[in-house]
Amino acid sequence: MKLRPDFLPRLDSLQARLIAAAAVWTLVGLIVGGFLLSGVFRASVEENFDARLKFDLDGMIAAAEPDPSGNVSLEGRFADPRFERVFSGWYWRITPLDKAGPDLSGAQRSRSLFDSDIRVLDSHPITGGLIQGTGLGPENVPLRFVGQRISFPVTATPDPSDSRAYEFLVAGDATQVEKEVDRFNGTLIWSFALLGLGLLAGVFVQVRVGLQPLRRVREALARIRDGKARRLDGKFPAEIAPLAGELNSLIEHSAEVVGRARTHVSNLAHFLKTPLTVLSSEAAAHPGPLADAVMRQVMSMRRQVDHYLARARAAGAVDVLGNRTPVKPVLDDLARVLTRIHSERDIAITVDCPSALAFRGERQDLEEMAGNLIDNACKWARAKVSVRAAQTGARFTLSVGDDGEGLDEDQRHMVGERGERLDESVPGTGLGLAIVRDIAKLYGGEFTLGESSLGGLEAKVTLPAIA
């Protein structure tokens, strides 16, 4: 069951690593940036809030009117609806200062405080003789305040240095700051979330597009392996072009090495067969016990030479990239040739093979296997030989059956696994099926013998196909 869509990268892929690294750095950057922006916004809101308090404080100080005895009054001179509405969140207080400290009993308060007061929690001086801090207001609402100490002259006494000091304090509801910051943080979170998703989508697209040349190399190699191409073709980026060039050089070198090996194998075959032919001719010309022994040894040497030369040729072909052989033309050609060879027995060979079926290997290896199977079937058939090829995924099965006497299970084991000849009266070296088995193994295939639907023996070989 396929759980991962094709467009998603594998967890162990280069794409996944690049995307994961970008995702981590994006997440870290957005988190750090979010905290920085939230901190800057909070500082700006607090600064604006304090500036507003300072503006109200300046207005209140300017509106304060001292009388000759030094008492201060704001009656009718500082009218602001915010300070008139009860528990509005905006408050002011004017507290007389004496040698013992603030005299809260004589303090003047805004109407918004009603019967409550401002409880100072902490304060610290700032520039211009101002103080700033936090406190609690009505219903324990947190407040931010600014205050300033102001002295007014007392003109009712003859001492011109006589004065009276007051602490002017304006406070505002600090939860307004938190609400603005919370609204900003909410907007920041979803906007950064969308930004992060957009960045990750952009990184995903960038990685996919950036690694496209590597996918083209993979697809080109797959075409070469399937026999649809002989080299890596196309234009590649500067970083990939050297790799493509080296791969093409490696493919060409491999083909050249295999070609030289094939030539040496062919030369060796001709070199060995000529002396063997001479020995066979001399033995035939001088009959006797010695000639018979020589003929048997020559026949054995021919069988071994044919066997191991076929294996060497097939082993070299397996390592070559780009081999592709259509199956139907090979089977049709073999059927025509073998029909003529066995024409005196009037053997009918039928071929059933899809025209699109292709063998992932050398043509002469397919001819070697199919030819041995069909020839063996013709030798033992009464009148009919059936050749069928069917593909299943990346493999195909070649089945060759006849209407001869067939073999029982023990005989099939002796012939298929051990390569023994059961009847020396039929011409041949007896190595045909052994060669088929060895070549099939080199291609990762299987060779089996069974009972044919025609009544005789059926040989099956499974080989790699081009999907």
Image (spheres, grey):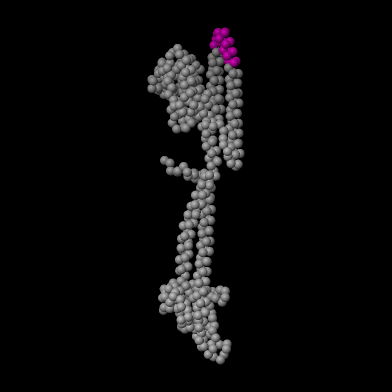
Residue 363 rendering spot, x and y as whole percentages: 52, 25
Residue 343 rendering spot, x and y as whole percentages: 45, 13
Magenta span: chief secondary structure:
helix
Answer above or below: position of 184 versus 199.
Answer: below
Say which quarter of the image contains residue 300: top right
Answer above or below: position of 445 versus 107.
Answer: above
Residue 259 rendering spot, x and y as whole percentages: 59, 26
Does the segment drawn in magenta span residue 447? no
Answer above or below: position of 298 versus 174.
Answer: above
Q: Magenta residues, as a range?
A: 274-292
Q: Nearer the viewer, residue 409 or 405?
A: 405
Residue 434 rendering spot, x and y as whole percentages: 49, 22
Q: Determine the residue positioned at 51% across, 22% down.
A: 368
Q: Determine the residue positioned at 58% across, 17% down.
A: 273
Q: Nearer the viewer, residue 334 or 316?
A: 334
Question: Which corner quadrant holds the N terminus?
Answer: top left
Say which quarter of the image contains residue 377: top left
